[in-house]
Image (tube, grey):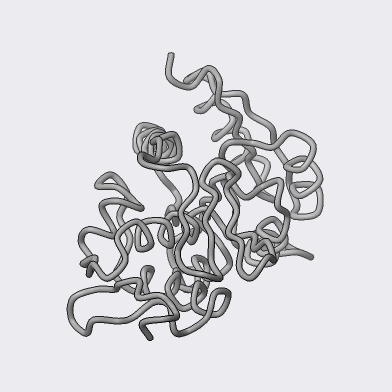
Amino acid sequence: MAGNSHKILLVDDEPDILEFLKYSLEKEKYSVTIADNGADAIKLALANIPDLILLDVMMPDMDGMETCTRMRERKELSNTIIAFLTARGEDYSQIAGFSAGADDYITKPIKPKVLISRIKALLRRNASPNDSATVLQANGSLKIDKERYIVIKKGKELSLPKKEFELLTLLVSKPGKVFTRDVILSEIWGHDIVVGNRTIDVHIRKLREKIGDDLIQTVKGVGYKFIGAEAA
């Protein structure tokens, strides 16, 4: 069955929700670990390196935002998918969640079949192999190593969240080509996952902060293209 080899970490401070989610996922043969607070979640994630983390937003002491941010600071978890779980009516911005490094945003309560479908879609996108060379030389100062999942700028390794890495790799794969928003959403997030256009903007902004403003150009009303420092 499709879930046999995948490990999932559930993080929520409500025991009933943890029990419900754990039961639903284990029925699909996923290997499930649970935590009821952010600090324990980080420890468990580093000990087990899950394929996917379902992370509640509103938790005492360390909320989901801070927990996600800290997880994304750890290179060991760079390939782990993080999806926020949030209750309807929470005054919480999806953009803030994606800014913290989340890959998806799921509203609860959610029907088990819908949840499983979302999880399968996330894991399927995560497993999609990249084609072409394993190393992309973007320009004289930027190199992307797809096999090691790192970006090297002027000899320094940059640790990027998975979606930022995939977005940069897509743009660099064809320098000068304008990638439309629809193409980016399809290639990076897939048709099974619903995210807004502002999600792309957030990831582009964070990429620019890390690799420089002059490498990615906005084509107003269309999308983005990688131009390289020499062409800027």
Quadrant position of the N terminus in the picture = top left
Above/below status of 131 relative to 156: above
In the rendering, at what x and y percent does residue 116 appear? 41, 33
| Left or right: 44 as drawn, with respect to 89 | right
- Residue at 49% x, 78% y is 208
Residue 59 in picture, x, y percent from top left: 69, 60
Name the spot of residue 15 as percent of width and height, x first. Answer: 68, 41
Residue at x-position 56% and y-position 70% = 141
Measured as percent of width and height from the top left, residue 203 is found at: 45, 69
Q: Is residue 43 above or below residue 49?
A: below
Q: Which quadrant would residue 50 be assigned to in this image?
A: top right
- Tally the numbered discs: 0
Residue depicted at x 61% and y 61%: 152
* Front-most of residues 66 and 88: 66
Q: Quadrant of residue 16?
A: top right
Above or below, 164 against 54 in this view is below
Residue in front for this viewpoint, 115 or 152: 152
Left or right: residue 44 versus residue 24 is: right
Q: Quadrant of the C terminus?
A: bottom left
Of 101 and 176, nearer the camera is 176
Image side of residue 49 versus residue 125, left or right: right
In this image, 215 relative to 64: left or right? left
Furthest-top residue in this view: 1
Q: Work out whether residue 16 or residue 5 is closer to the camera in this orientation and state it.
A: 5
